[in-house]
Amino acid sequence: MPSTRAANGADHAVFSLEQSVAGMHAAADFVADRVINREAIIHQAFLALLTGEHLLLQSRTGAGKTLLAEQVFAMFNGANIFKVQASKEQQPDTYFGGLDVAMLKEGKVFHNTEGSIVDCEFAFIDEIFDANDFTLRALLSVLNERALVRGVQNQPAKTHTVIAATNYLRVNEVTEAILDRFMFKAVILPDKNPFLQYRISRRYLKHGGEKVTPPKVIPFATLQRLNRIVTGRDEQYAVGISDDVLYFMNLVVRHYEYARNRMLRETHDRRAVREMPEYYVSPRSQAKALDVLRAIAVWNGRTAVERDDVKALTSIFATVGVEEEVQTFNKSYTTLVNTLSVSNGFEQLKVLLSFASMLSELKADPRLLGHPLTELEHTPIRRTFFDWLKDSLSGGGSVEDQNRRILRQFLQEFIPVCEEIRELKAQLEQEVVILTRS
């Protein structure tokens, strides 16, 4: 389990988001020039680096998985790199360092982590599913919580991104949890196109299948800054996601989850389907998809997520290289775009989500119900509601009674143009009932 340190280079220049992203693009292009015909997977790898997530590569032997991982990591300096070939005989100390003998005599499990995966920013694990389940389970906290949690030891891990490779998948309770920690997954299929093989052969003759030192590297500190931006932890830059894009993303993911399971049922016999775990998008993956959306926006030179960026989530919800999964996700995206584009569905979505944000404000401070709703017009509510409101102010009773009646009446008169909008309206009607009862 050797650990190598990339050459350190100090970069004291003022941070520029535009220049930093340009540097990432140049690095990705350099890797693509070295690792032929892997552009989609290289894009995944750089999204994984931006988000601080992990990438799993599956292929038959000799497909260049190791070269890809090593060349990606070689594009950065100032980071430790942990490398290991997994095997069933290995114990957790292969990954976390040898046990402290003195503490072991006291009955305490404690690892000396210097040079281990815990002490490294990058890691490459070859044949990860050759590792036994005990070791894989021990890796879970490092991959997700970025901490070594074993016995009395609870130590933060420096781990930023892990690239793992495998020739096969094995599925059980432990490996399913491991797979969920790898946000990005790709299958590398053999391609015997003569011209492609010619390009690969020329690269091999020049470099012998080894990684190449790039002419320009990216300081790891720059990657860390970009990671803080796309994960919403930077004080200077914020990447915005509007409510309608957020809601639309969740609609696409739900539609895709259903479509994937329907595809499984259609392509396998009933017995095989019963034995096969259904496709499942965990709440963890769905939440982290927001970081991926922000990374996609930043990669495209923007500080705001656009609706079209949702389509690029194939990089995490579909296995790149498995065309059926990619096409299924694209179909889910296209179906919902077409559905919501009919009769101004996206505009209705924005109106209802703005109405929902007003309900949230009223729930947070019920005293606002005692004031005219027009006083909330300064909040980010769609003007459509207030235009309607000004035409609907009638009837007696207290201001609070009028407000309750107005909230109910707005939804009663709202005519959804599609099932997705109808579903959202029904949920908001329940929210109004709860609010007005209280």
Image: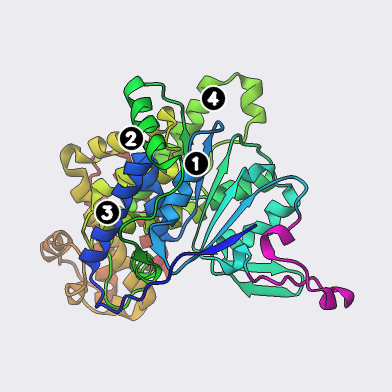
Q: How far apart are marks 3 and 4 (CA)?
A: 43 Å
**What SS does tag 3 mark?**
helix
Looking at the rendered structure, the secondary structure element under dot 4 is helix
Q: Which of marks 1 and 4 is in front?
A: 1
Residue located beneath label 1 in the image: 65
Q: Mark 4 points at which residue?
A: 265
Q: What residue appears at the point 57 percent right and 46 percent down from the top-left corner?
A: 179
**Which sits earlier in the primary sequence, circle 1 or circle 3?**
3
Decide which of tag 3 and tag 4 comes sooner along the chain: 3
Q: Please indicate whether residue 330 sits to the left or right of residue 103 in the image.
A: left
Of the numbered discs 2 and 3, the one sitting upstream in the chain is 3
Amino acid at circle 1: Lys
Q: Where in the figure is residue 384, as x and y percent of width and height?
A: 14, 59
Q: Which residue is drawn at 75% across and 75% down?
A: 152
Amino acid type shown at disc 4: Arg
Q: In which quarter of the image is residue 77?
A: bottom left
Q: Give the range drawn in magenta.
A: 91-114
Please tell me whether mark 2 sits on a helix, a strand or a loop: helix
Amino acid type at mark 3: Ala
Task: Kindly indicate whether the residue at mark 3 contacts the one at mark 1 (C-beta within 8 angstroms).
Answer: no
